Amino acid sequence: MSDRIAGLLFAALAAWAFVTAGSFEAGFSDPVGPAAFPRLLAVPLGILSLFLILRPDPNPRWAGGRPLLRQALAVAVLGGYALLLETLGFPVATLLGVTFLARLLGARWLPALATGTALSLVLFVLFDQVLDLPLPLWPQTVG
């Protein structure tokens, strides 16, 4: 039953993302529009949800203890990343997000920090310069 409940939640999320994406507006000229990416993600999520609803695992095992805590912390890191993206700027928020996710996956501090630094810079250049998607570079000031 737990797979079916998760499938229903994922189906609702996919439908919400697909419908909500239609109201996105971009302040720059984008040939496909800002709705393309969320809708592109909503379709496979909807297919996954149908699979979970129609073909659930006969004997699912839920995580407990440390694995469940690590999963909750990963969700918290991703939520914090979304909240801090505009406030801290893309490179700093991505550096922190990737570093903490790497630590949750078992990396030591120095490799996690190096990965976070490299990935934040490469992704910023890729999105901002190559794909011409404007991203906040520096922390935004209020007022």
Image (spheres, helix red, strand yellow):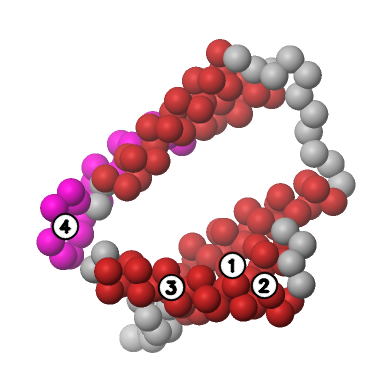
Between 71 and 86, the one lying in front of the other is 71
Total number of numbered discs in the rendering? 4
Q: CA distance from mark 2 to mark 1?
A: 7 Å
Q: Quadrant of the C terminus?
A: bottom left
Q: Looking at the rendered structure, which numbered label has been put on residue 79?
A: none
Asked if 1 appears above or below 88 in the picture, the reply is above
Between 96 and 22, the one lying in front of the other is 96
Q: Looking at the rendered structure, which numbered label has been put on residue 122?
A: 3
* Mark 1 residue element: helix
* Marks 3 and 2, the one that precedes in the sequence: 2
Q: Which residue is mark 4?
A: 30
Q: Residue at x 13, y 53 (%)?
A: 31
Please tell me whether residue 18 belongs to the stretch shown in magenta: yes
* Marks 4 and 3, the one that precedes in the sequence: 4
Q: Which residue is mark 2?
A: 112
Asked if 17 appears above or below 82 in the picture, the reply is above
Q: Residue at x 28, y 74 (%)?
A: 129
Q: Residues within 10 Å of mark 2 (few under 14, many from 20)?
A: many
Between 125 and 16, the one lying in front of the other is 125
Amino acid type assigned to the residue bearing label 1 in the image:
Val
* Mark 2 residue element: helix
Q: Nearer the viewer, mark 2 or mark 1?
A: 2
In the image, the segment drawn in magenta is 12-33
* Marks 3 and 1, the one that precedes in the sequence: 1
Q: CA distance from mark 4 to mark 3?
A: 22 Å
